[in-house]
Amino acid sequence: MQLPQQRPHHDIAALFAGAKDFLRVSAPMVRYSKLEFRRLLRQNGVQLAFTPMMISDSINNSEKARQNEFSTGLDDQPLIAQFAAKDATEFVTSAQLIYPYADGVDLNCGCPQSWAIAKGYGCGLLRQPEQVRDIVQCLRRTLPARFSVSVKMRLLQSRDNETSVQKTIELAQQLEHCGVTFLTLHGRTPTQKHSKDTLNVAAMAEVAQSLQIPLIVNGNVESFQDACELHEKTKAAGVMAARGLLANPALFNNEYQLATSTPKECVEQWLDIAETAGDHLHFQCFHHHLSFMWSNAMKRATRVQFNSLSSRAQVLEFMGEHFDVHPRGRSLGASYTNCTYSHFTPPKHARHLAAEAEDSSWDAGSDGKFFTEFKTNQLSNDNTEDLELDGLFAHGD
């Protein structure tokens, strides 16, 4: 099928091959890995970025969903668009729609949340390995080989660790034979909660060793040292971070390898990006990111005041007055692509129409569970050094 390209596609396999040690990758983070934050991450060492997870059924059937959930610019590359899909038709349709604007698509088989599993998304697909294989094969038959297709997955659930690892290796090798460009593996099973102790580094190393294609490993990456250690122990081609990048977007920046919190310069970059973005960046998203990256610099009373701010002007005044943090007026020249989708008309199915009518699955205007719990943790903790993002984020780490 001939589809238009808004720009030449990057060769993602070559990107891995050209990495000096390991590829620095930012995770798909619902609500947070949007264009403006990806721009900040790319200025600070990230070499491959994912969009937030998008629901294929919504993207395929709603122009409003496409405009709300996806944005990009000519500087936003290389880029992988991640989708939650139940079957090959949904996933391939989304890939055809997004083809002009991204370098590849990723199938989410890693989201452990109960709502996703109940709808057949995320980890729910790991119960149907034949379905995952069919999805990859259908996409490979439809789009050019240079366009990347990948799967983000967890260790498969089993009665014991040895069987879990073996089943994971078998699925990973099957997907390799189906034509995936790379895989991402989170080192926990779907039922394991986030903690330092539950990450199975040895299992990730076994899976990496069993493959000829690149493997990105994911889990517990909260500093540059964590990333280097995970790479050293697994020999994986890439390392992905999620909550670590929310807390410190400069995590992969070589100039700040020993930093234990977000450098002031990085925060000022975010203020510059916000000024350039204007109305493209919603205040809520702008404010949340500052909360994640700068909370450790605030005492409790200051946090309470910061959380009550309701406009960008108030935030800029507050950051300047309390922390001498100001936008530097660096013109980024960052543009926004006018994403249109007239190149492809998605097929309509009765199930899609019914799902669209019953489910506008989440409210983009709400704070969301992750930030709500993070803010509660902030305000109940007087010790600024104890504030962490651990345990609050489900989709990346």
Image (tube, rainbow, N blue to C red):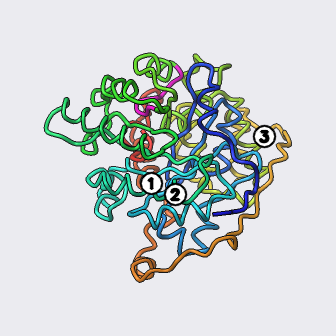
Front disc: 1 or 3: 1
Residue at the disc numbered 2: 141
- The magenta segment is 216-224
**Residue 21: image location, x then y, percent:** 57, 19
Q: Is residue 19 above or below residue 39?
A: above
225 displayed left or right of 66: left
Q: Amino acid at mark 1?
A: Gln
**Cα–Cα gap, marks 3 and 2:** 48 Å
**Cα–Cα gap, marks 2 and 1:** 6 Å
Q: Secondary structure at mark 1?
A: helix
Q: Amino acid at mark 3?
A: Pro
89 displayed left or right of 315: left
Q: Residues within 10 Å of mark 2 (few under 14, many from 20)?
A: few
Q: Residue furthest left?
A: 159
Front disc: 3 or 2: 2
Residue at the disc numbered 1: 137
**Residue 79: image location, x then y, percent:** 63, 46
Earlier in the chain: of badge 3 and badge 2, it is: 2
Image quadrant in which you'd find residue 254: top right
Q: Is 221 inside the magenta-drawn segment?
A: yes
**Cα–Cα gap, marks 1 and 3:** 48 Å
**Residue 180: image location, x then y, percent:** 48, 44
Pointer 2 with pointer 1, Cβ within 8 A: yes
Quadrant of the snapshot with the N terminus: bottom right
Q: Is residue 221 above or below residue 3?
A: above
Q: Secondary structure at mark 3?
A: loop
Q: Amino acid at mark 2?
A: Arg
Residue at the disc numbered 3: 327
224 displayed left or right of 175: right
